[in-house]
Amino acid sequence: MDQLWANRAASAEAAIAKRHLKKLWGLPGTQLGVVAWPAGQQHRRFGTWHYWWQAHLLDNLVDAQVRDPRPERLESINRQIRGQRLRNLGRWVNDYYDDMAWLALALERAGRLTGVGRPKALETLSEQFLNAWVPEDGGGIPWRKQDQFFNAPANGPAGIFLARYEGRLRRAQQMADWIDEILIDPETHLVFDGIKAGSLVRAQYTYCQGVILGLETELAVRTEDAEHAERVHRLVAAVAEHMAPDGVIKGAGGGDGGLFNGILARYLALVATALPRRGPDDEKACQTARSVVLASAEAAWEHRQTAEDLPLFSAFWEREAELPTAGSKEAEFVEGAVNSSQIPERDLSVQLSGWMLMEAAHTVAGTVPDGDSDT
């Protein structure tokens, strides 16, 4: 079973490599992901490039290297990191804490799991998150600099990174406690988006659930506090009930939303493989997380299109993918977020999610829960 998912993940990786990977401005030793396929001139020149999408591309390359270690992929990981820094004008940081958190996560994993390390970058990014912590203002860390919106998409991934990064566990615990106190819906037990000027922003996105699952799982692994595992149990059950009808994670279209379902799949896979199994509630959460990942991956694979003998995934995994065209309306950057292309499958974000899901399925397929078997 895990070989089947390895093959599908490899196909998804090959599709991204063929359609999206390109040298940055023709410079040797660099690459980035072109943000659309088919690509317009602005895309090919990296006039638009979307910092946080590139961080997820790097994270997926790390997944692939763990699955199937290859020297040429290590070079691809190095090129991606160089390309991101150069396109960001020689810096690691930008004005958005969520963006920086996604890059920090990918760089930490690249160093720990593949040996392609950037310790100075991790130190720089770590300081950004530590210095942005403002409980006196109602946070949390804000979404972006000079902003009073404290949200799960910034605090969740920053907390995961700090839990994994040397000596920052206490701050990660504080972030998890702040989220649990402020952002959990008492009715559904899902995670609200954030809090602005003391008022809840009550939107509930799949990726918010994913990053909180990731944060609480990391803390369950690293601390003796049983509360973290209990929060994972509660949130996995809420996700299965409200965000995965018929077992398949809901899509959120293209643009930035194209990454939301893939991020949830990534951290459900982390629950399934990393949550300590100390009792029946842990087993149940792991099995539920695993089943949602595999059901979502089966649906996404079944509803893919094939272009040039390689998969093209749907933005909504339970629906048929639509082949994008060059003449359709492109994604647009509006007020700090990227809106979807007219055909969401055109967006790199959507295809990265499909690839992320295939890697997640491969990861969990090798773990057989009690009473379950793969044939």
Image (cartoon, rainbow, N blue to C red):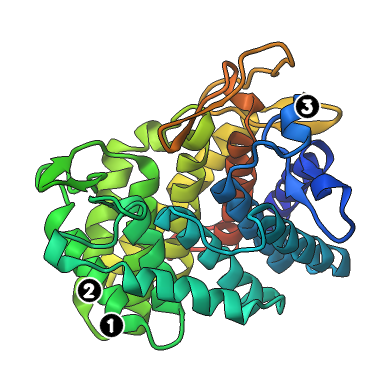
Q: Please tell me in which quadrant of the rendered image residue 366 appears.
A: bottom right
Q: Residue at x 53, y 28 (%)?
A: 254
Estimate how packed mark 1 is, as few (under 14), some (14 to 19) or many (20 or more) residues with alpha carbons within 10 Å.
few
Q: Amino acid at mark 2?
A: Gln
- Mark drawn on residue 41: 3
When the figure is inspected, residue 68 is found, relative to residue 98, above or below; the finding is below
Name the quadrant containing residue 175: bottom left
Image point (52%, 66%), residue name: 105
Spatial CA span between label 2 and label 3: 45 Å
- Label 3 packing within 10 angstroms: few (<14), some (14-19), many (20+): few
Q: Nearer the viewer, residue 68 or 364?
A: 68
Report if the CB atoms under discs 2 and 1 are less than 8 Å apart: yes
Q: Is residue 271 left or right of residue 306?
A: left
Which residue carries the number 1 mark?
A: 170
Q: Amino acid at mark 1?
A: Arg
Between disc 2 and disc 3, the foreground one is 3
Q: How many marks on residues? A: 3
Name the residue that disc number 2 marks.
174
Q: Earlier in the sequence, mark 2 or mark 3?
A: 3
Secondary structure beneath disc 1? helix
CB atoms at circles 2 and 3 under 8 Å apart?
no
